[in-house]
Amino acid sequence: MAALRSPHPDPIAPWAEVVPGAPHRMTVADLLDWPDDDGYRYEVVEGVLVRMAGSRPKAVRITDRLYRRLGDYVEAHDPGSTTPPDGVYDFEHTGQPNTGLLPDIGFYYGFREPLVQDDQPYPFAPDLAVEVASPSQDHDAMDNKARRYLRGGTGLVWVVWPQEETVDVWRPGDVTPSSTLTVADGLNGESVVPGFTYPVARLFP
């Protein structure tokens, strides 16, 4: 997702722009009711409303390829469910109050399904989170977001860098990426989505 440049970035969400004029303290419930018909994607981080511009075509194509392949695999093997870029995950119960994040692709285990309510955000962190970085998002910013996922209990994070044609892989306990994959490597669902693999090169045809 594309971030906006802001003269007043918030240090708790450096991958995005703080929304001018937003209420001082917001909840994830407030986020769900916030108008989203202006071309932005919104998140709330520790009560601060932030926004990102819509994705560019290259990022959209990357997200779509991986989402379809992962979704097909999950449907065939039934380990859980995938979510598209507008899926809101509520980190309230993970020690991060008033925080709702929207990964470009999310996956959660099937045993969590009874917790999901149709008109509420997902009440947990995703088990796999995929973020496709925009040209305006740097490594420090996306590292910050990856660590926030991990603190919430996410078991695997992939940060895709379209311009570099690489993927950073994050695992629990990491303070920097465990590894950086190139087009010679393949994504691996590891213990989170067992058996899922996908060549990195196919993300960037």
Image (tube, rainbow, N blue to C red):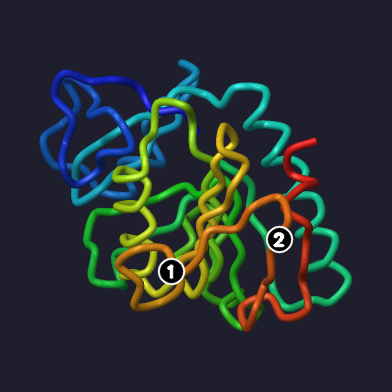
Q: Which residue lies furthest to the front in this view?
A: 184
Tell me the element at label 2: loop
The residue lying toward the viewer, choosing from 173 and 193, is 173
The residue lying toward the viewer, choosing from 177 and 36, is 177
Relative to 167, 122 lies left or right: left
**CA separation in Å, label 2 and label 1:** 30 Å
Q: What residue type is labelled 1?
A: Phe
Q: Position of residue 145 (x, y in %)?
A: 35, 52
Q: Mark 1 points at which residue?
A: 124
The residue lying toward the viewer, choosing from 188 and 72, is 188
Q: Mark 2 points at which residue?
A: 185
- Residue contact at pointers 2 and 1, CB within 8 angstroms: no
Relative to 189, 40 lies left or right: left
Please, is residue 153 above or below residue 69 in the view? below
Please, is residue 113 above or below residue 47 in the view? below
Q: Tell me the residue at 35%/72% (across/down).
A: 174
Please, is residue 146 above or below residue 16 in the view? below
Relative to 174, 81 lies left or right: right
